[in-house]
Amino acid sequence: MTYAQAGRAALAQAMRADQRVVALGEDVGRGGIFGQYQGLADEFGPARVIDAPISEATIMGAAVGMALAGLKPVVEMRVADFALCAMDELVNQAAKARYMFGGQARVPLVARLPIGIWSGAAAQHGQSFEAWFAHVPGLVVVAPATPQDNFTLLQASLACGDPVVYMEHKELWGLQGEVQAAQPAPLGRARIAREGKDVTLVTWSRALHVALACAQDAAAAGISVEVIDLRTIWPWDREAVLQSAAKTRRLLVVHEAVRAAGFGAEIAATVAEELGIPVRRLGGPRIPVGYSRPLEDEARVSMETIQQALRG
Amino acid sequence: MSADRLLSLFHTMARIRAFENAAEEASSGGVAAFGSTLGAAKVRGPLHLSTGQEAVPVGVCANLAAGDAITSTHRGHGHTIAKGASLEPMMCELFGRATGFNGGKGGSMHIADFSVGMLGANGVVAAGIPIAVGAAHAYRITGSKAVIACFFGDGAINRGPFLEGLNWAKIHVLPVLFVCEDNRYSAMTSTDAMTAGPGALARAESLGIAGLACDGNDVEAVHDAAAELLGRIRRGEGPQFLHAITYRVKGHVSVDPAAYRDRCELARALEQDPLALARERFSAHGIAAAELDRIVAQAEAEVAQALRAAAAAPFPDGEAAYTDIQDTGAGQWQ
Ligand SMILES: Cc1ncc(C[n+]2csc(CCOP(=O)(O)OP(=O)(O)O)c2C)c(N)n1
Ligand SMILES: [Mg+2]
C-alpha cells in the first residue's frame, strides 16, 4: 500500500478500536486533498470525521478543548505551513496544558503537519519545521519515511497521550511499501535502515530515501554506511545513534530542513560531546523554497553533496 | 455604459479567459494531488484557475487608477491581468523563467506586479486581508489619495484575519474596498455548509461596514457596484464591502476533477458564463458578433505570444536562489 493509504489505514483502525478518536480539518469529509482520509467519512460519519471551515486557529484550539474533554483528536493541517496560523493553540495551549495545570489534564492530540518541498509549490507550501517543534517542551515530533512507519507511528502517536506533531512528507504520499499491521514501533525508537561500519548517517523523512541511494553508491566505492532512520525527532533515540557512532567513529546527519539551527545540529553536538568523534551535518541552505525548478533544486540537499560528505 | 467601455471590459475578460485556458493546458501533471501523478509539465505546482470568475476583477479594477493597489489570493491571475499586468512576464513566471515578474521565485500562487499596484497573490487564505488594511493605513499616514481593493474568497471569511482586518479598517476609517469573490467553494468543500449566518456582507455590516451584493458574473453589475463603493471610499467614508457572487467552474486546482460536486450545478453555472452574458449585452449596443470574435481572437493571440515568449525564455540560474532573501543588517537600505 502507499504511504498515504498506510496513514489512512492506521487512522481507520484506531477509530474502529477507540470511539474517542476523531479527525477534524478542511476537506476531510471528502478524503483530504492527498486522499489520506479516503472513505473515513463514509465509515465513521460526519460526527467523527469533522469537516472544518478554513479556521486553522479554531481547528487546533477546538482539538485542544476536545482533548481536555476526553477525546483523542487527529488534527489535519493540510501542510505544515498553514499550521503557522495555529501556533498559539499548538505551542502555548496544547504543549503547555499538562504542565501548567500541574498534571490535572492531558492533551492527547495528533496534529498532522505534512512537511517538505513539494513539486513547484514554492515558498509557502514546502517548509520543514520539525526543529521548531522539537524546541518546544511538551511536544512529541514524528517524521515517518515509509508506509510501514506511517502506519505504525500514527498508531503509536494516537496512543501517546500527549500532543504529537506528526509530520508526513508530501512527496512520499505515493510511495509503495509493505505494511504489517502487527509490527509495533514505539515512539522515540530509531530504525537501522542499512547496516554499515565506516560511517553513521542519521536522517529522517524523505531524505532517508536519498541517503539510502547514496549509501548504495558509497558501498560500490568501498565505504560502508550505516543509515539510521530517526523516525521520532523528539524524543530522539540517543542510544541508537550513540551506539552506532561509537562503532563507526564518524557521524553525518542529513535532513531536508534548513541546515542552520536545524535538528541535525542537536544530534551532531550531542555525538561530539559524548564521543568526541568527527561530526558533519547537511541540510538545505537558508533560502526560501523557490518555484522554478533550478531554484527549488538549490533548496534540496543533492546526492552529490551527500556522497562528497561520505567520502570525507 | 458606453459601448467602448463595455468592449474594453470584454477584452480584459477575454484575455483572462485565454490566459487561464493556456495555463491549464500547460499544467497537466504539474503537481501530485487529487490522485494525479507528476508529469513533466511546463507549469508546475498547484494552479488555481479563475475561469468563469473574470467579471469580478475586471469590473472592480476598471474603477481603479494606476496609483491604486490590490491584494490578491492563490487564485490571482485574473486580478493581476485586470490591474494591468502584462501577459508575457506573467506567463514567464508560470513557466518558472528568469523573465517572469518574480524571476521564477514565486510561480502562479505568488504572482505579483508591483509596478501596476498588484501587491501579490498569496498562498495563505485570508493573508491578503490584513496586508491590504495595512497598505491603506499607510496611505492614510502618508497622505496618499490611493485606495486599495482587497480580493478574497468566500472561504476566507471563516478565518480570524477577516474579522480582525475588517475591524481595523473600520476603526481607522481606511480606504479599502473588500471584495469577496464568492465562488461557492472552499477547495473541496461547499462553503455554505461551513459558514454560519447570512453571509459575508452581513458580517461586514455587523462591524458597521456598508456594502453591496452583486451578480459577480455580470461585469456591468460588478463595475457599477464597485464604482459606487469606491466613490464612497474616495469621499473619505471608510471601508466598503462588495459581495460578488460567481462560480468556480474548474476544480480547486487544475488537476482536481471536482468529482465531489453536482454535475447539474456546474451545467447551470456554465449558462451564466460572464463572457457569454457580456456578449448578450452587446446586441443592445448594436455591436456585431464579428467584432467580439475579433477581440477574442486578439486576446488569444496575445496569450499565444506570451506562451511563445515563456517557452523561449531562460530559466533562472541556481545562484538566483540566494538573492533577495534579506540583507545582513548593515543599515544601508534607504
Ligand atoms: C490558511 C490556509 N488554510 C488552508 C489553505 C488551503 N487552501 C487553499 S485555497 C483554499 C480554499 C479557499 O477558498 P476561498 O477562500 O473560497 O477561495 P477560492 O479557492 O474559492 O478562490 C484552501 C482551503 C491555505 N492556502 N491557507
Ligand atoms: Mg471560494
Image (spheres, coloured by chain):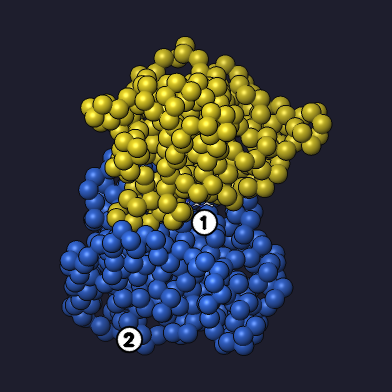
Of the pair A164 and B61, the residue shown nearer to us: A164
Quarter holding the C terminus of chain A is: top left
The tint of chain B in the picture is: blue
Looking at the image, residue B237 lies above or below residue A227: below
The structure residue drawn at horizontal position 44% and vertical position 84%, both measured from the top left corner, is B66
Q: Residues within 10 Å of mark 1 (few under 14, many from 20)?
A: many
Q: What x and y, as percent, mark residue B202?
A: 64, 63
The structure residue drawn at horizontal position 48% and vertical position 23%, both measured from the top left corner, is A246
Q: Residues within 10 Å of mark 2 (few under 14, many from 20)?
A: some
Secondary structure state at the residue bearing disc 1:
loop
Quarter holding the N terminus of chain A is: top left
Q: Is residue B135 left or right of residue B269?
A: right
Label 2 sits on residue: B3
**Residue B125, label in figure:** 1
Between disc 1 and disc 2, the foreground one is 1
Q: What x and y, as percent, mark residue A302?
A: 32, 44
Task: Answer yes or no: disc 1 within 8 Å of ligand 1.
Answer: yes
Task: Check the residue under mark 2 and report the chain it is in.
Answer: B
Q: What x and y, as percent, mark residue B63?
A: 46, 82
Looking at the image, residue A248 lies above or below residue B265: above
Q: Earlier in the sequence, mark 1 or mark 2?
A: 2
Three-letter amino acid code at the position of disc 2: Ala
The residues bearing labels 1 and 2 have C-alpha atoms spaced at a distance of: 37 Å
